[in-house]
Amino acid sequence: MTISGKARLAGVMGWPVAHSLSPRLHNFWIEQHGIDGAYVPLPVRPEHFDDAVRALATLGFAGVNVTVPHKQAALAVADRVEPLAARIGAANTLIFDAGGAIEARNTDAFGFAENLRASEGPDVLRRGPAVLVGAGGSARAVVAALVDAGAPEIRIVNRTRAKAEAIANSLGTPCAVVDWDRRGEALEGAMLLVNATTQGMQGQPPLDLALDRLPREAVVTDLIYVPLETPLLAAARARGNRTVDGLGMLLYQALAGFTAWFGVAPKVDEALRRFVLAGLAGG
Ligand code: NAP
């Protein structure tokens, strides 16, 4: 690693942030491209978020990724907000210009879409009805990606129905809300199933969803990547559905920020995936 007086600096701001794989991921690319720079973890309490972002812009950082719980605050602190981030209502990438002005972008929607396209082909988001389980922060990016890709129908199922309705109302016409109690029926005729809840994460119970009505041709994906194969993905694979894990979304969402901060367009490939996975395993 080279750090000269002209080094470019970026990082990830979260609270907590120690679990984040973003430093490992970005520093892999920094090393691979022989870049004079570094990407560092930035643990910042919510009450200090605005001051911390402005300070980094003043200090000459090129920008930061923003993770839980700061993704909404990242919109408010920005001088410019990209239209997609405004629609989603959250930003995960901040880019500082030479004058210190802050631009907010959301690259989670791209990360979600590109991960699926890379594995299942360019039409995977628009082959037929999509069922989204969950209506939290990341679900908004998933719906934006599906709408923009031309999904003909998006069925949103969430334990708290009002949150699914809020997403459907703000993000577009192909959305329909289905009651939590009817989530099994919602799978009828679906071509894509997305889990955007926290159910199935390490330490959490599996997502409570019977797959019997899901067509075998449907692709099943989970945003969770710890574990890499969630109980939902294991059950889907066992009955013959194709599955896509959530790690690729993390890798693809990182591309745009890295390119803007370090001036090099990196690649998501098997070597990167293996390196980041080794970090998950504590390597
Ligand atoms: P969030 O805003 O906290 O939303 C959590 C969602 O899970 C809500 O829809 C919530 O339903 C649902 N939920 C929680 N407990 C539940 C239960 N017992 N039964 C049914 N539903 C339950 O979380 P988020 O930020 O959207 O993240 C969701 C997941 O995506 C997390 O596992 C996160 O790690 C993952 N993620 C991955 C990536 C990636 O790059 N791969 C990016 C972002 C997020 P209610 O509304 O009813 O509470």
Image (tube, rainbow, N blue to C red):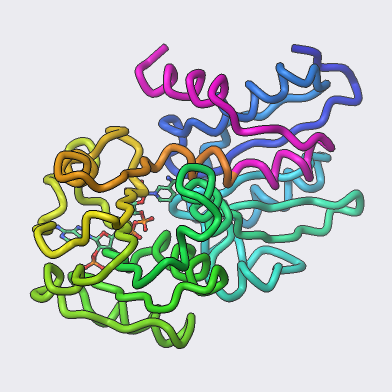
Which residue is located at x 73 percent, y 46 percent?
55
Q: Residue 265, percent across and down?
A: 77, 37
The answer to which quarter of the image holds residue 260 is top right
Compared to 79, does 111 lie above or below? above
Q: Quadrant of ligand 1?
A: bottom left
Q: Residue 279, percent across and down?
A: 44, 20
Q: How many marks?
A: 0
Q: Along the horizontal axis of the image, is 63 left or right of 148?
A: right
The answer to which quarter of the image holds residue 193 is bottom left
Magenta region's main secondary structure?
Answer: helix
In the rendered image, the quadrant that contains the N terminus is: top right
Q: Along the horizontal axis of the image, is 109 left or right of 143?
A: right
Q: Is residue 204 visible in this depiction of the protein?
A: no
Which residue is located at x 32 percent, y 83 percent?
176
Magenta span includes 279: yes
Q: Say which of 58 and 224 sits in front.
A: 224
Which residue is located at x 23 percent, y 39 percent?
230
Q: Residue 249, percent across and down?
A: 49, 45
Which residue is located at x 15 percent, y 45 percent?
239
Q: Along the horizontal axis of the image, is 84 left or right of 176?
A: right
Q: Along the horizontal axis of the image, is 245 left or right of 22?
A: left
Magenta span includes 108: no
Instruction: Read off the magenta span.
Output: 254-283
